[in-house]
Amino acid sequence: MKGVVRLIQPMAVMTLLAMVGTACVPAERAESAARSSPEAEGMKPVELAQLADGGYTLKGPYGFNGTLTHGDKGPWTLKARFVFPTAGYSVGEVKILVEKTLPEHVMITVPVTVPPKDAALAQAQTEEPVTETIAVSHRATFEVHIAVSVAEN
């Protein structure tokens, strides 16, 4: 009986799920996330709402809206855009980290540089598209964050 318990315990830990945003992740990853809160590191979470077909809608800071979808046999596609309130904002290169777990867990980070608070800027909305292709299984879970930094004068 002890041998059976040893085999079940590691699996039991992996099957305990916690919610981070709306993406399911193993409990130990959720505990790690709680210890190093993205908010404290200049990171802002993006809300993921599941679509009926298995994809997600995305909603985040700085007017970030879009979708994360997949075709029948194709990769996932991230299509989103920012709507910034003024000029002076910029979007950097999107970082995608795929954890080789079953199913894969994908962490997407979109860097945004915001203008300094005292900058004199044109008061015109600006839009910036974000498009990425991610080759992971259809069962993958996702986490999306906006990494915010302030431009120097």
Image (cartoon, helix red, strand yellow):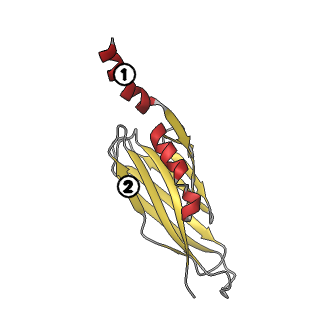
**Mark 2 or mark 1, earlier in chain:** 1
Could you say which is closer to the camera, residue 54 or residue 88? 88
State the mark number for residue 8. 1
Quadrant for residue 2, please give it: top left
Q: Is residue 51 visible?
A: no
Q: Which mark is residue 91?
A: none
Which label sits on residue 97? 2
Give how far apart the Cα atoms at labels 2 and 1 are: 29 Å
Indicate the position of residue 134 as horizontal and vertical percent values.
Answer: 37, 53
Which is more foreground, mark 2 or mark 1?
Answer: 1
Residue 68: % across, % down: 48, 51
Q: Is residue 64 above or below residue 152?
A: above
For residue 94, side relative to residue 47 (left or right): left
The amino acid marked with disc number 2 is Leu
Could you tell me which secondary element the residue under label 1 belongs to?
A: helix
Label 1: how many Cα within 10 Å (few below 14, some 14–19, many 20+): few
**In-front residue for pair 152/113:** 152
Mark 2, Cα crowd under 10 Å, few <14 / some 14-19 / many 20+, is: few
Q: Amino acid at mark 1?
A: Ile
Apparent side of residue 29 relative to residue 59 in the rendered image (left or right):
left
| Residue at the left extreme, as displayed | 3
Q: Say whether marks 2 and 1 touch (CB < 8 Å).
A: no
Residue drawn at (48%, 47%) of the image: 32
